[in-house]
Amino acid sequence: MQRTIIGFHQDEDGDWVAELSCLHNQHVRHRPPFQQRPWVLDESQRAARVGAELDCPLCDG
Ligand SMILES: [Zn+2]
């Protein structure tokens, strides 16, 4: 289900976690070459994605 990103925080390992409008959290890792999300490392690019949609598998149950 598509949910809106309402913010980001880092977990204890320093990986970035998106906070969704459904109050679920979803990791958005940058782990090349498997997961390419260089934008997550940049504060302004993260901020630009607040309000964007992200698929939430937890809501699909
Ligand atoms: Zn959810």
Image (cartoon, grey):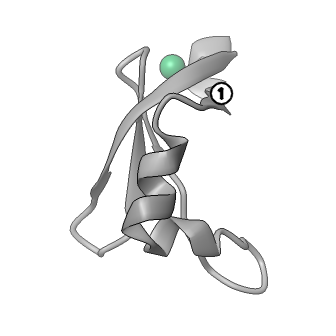
Q: Tell me the amino acid under the disc marked 1.
A: Pro
Q: Is mark 1 within 8 Å of ligand 1?
A: yes
- In the displayed orientation, state which residue is furthest to the bottom: 33
Above or below 56: residue 45? below
Spot occupied by residue 44 in the image (x, y as percentages of width and height) = 42, 62
The answer to whether residue 4 is left or right of residue 56 is: left
Q: How many labels does the image show?
A: 1
Spot occupied by residue 26 in the image (x, y as percentages of width and height) = 48, 42
Q: What element carries label 1?
A: helix
Above or below 31: residue 7? above
Q: Nearer the viewer, residue 30 or 52?
A: 52
Spot occupied by residue 1 in the image (x, y as percentages of width and height) = 69, 15
Q: Name the residue under label 1.
A: 57
The answer to whether residue 39 is left or right of residue 24 is: right
The residue shown at (72%, 71%) is 35
The residue shown at (58%, 19%) is 3
The residue shown at (77%, 77%) is 34
Name the quadrant of the C terminus. Answer: top right
Above or below 17: residue 2? above
* Label 1, residues with CA under 10 Å away: few <14, some 14-19, many ≥20: few
Q: In which quarter of the image is residue 59?
A: top right
Spot occupied by residue 27 in the image (x, y as percentages of width and height) = 49, 53
Query: Is residue 61 visible in the rendered structure shown here?
Result: no
- In the displayed orientation, state which residue is furthest to the left: 12
Query: Is residue 48 visible in the rendered structure shown here?
Result: yes
Above or below 13: residue 24? above
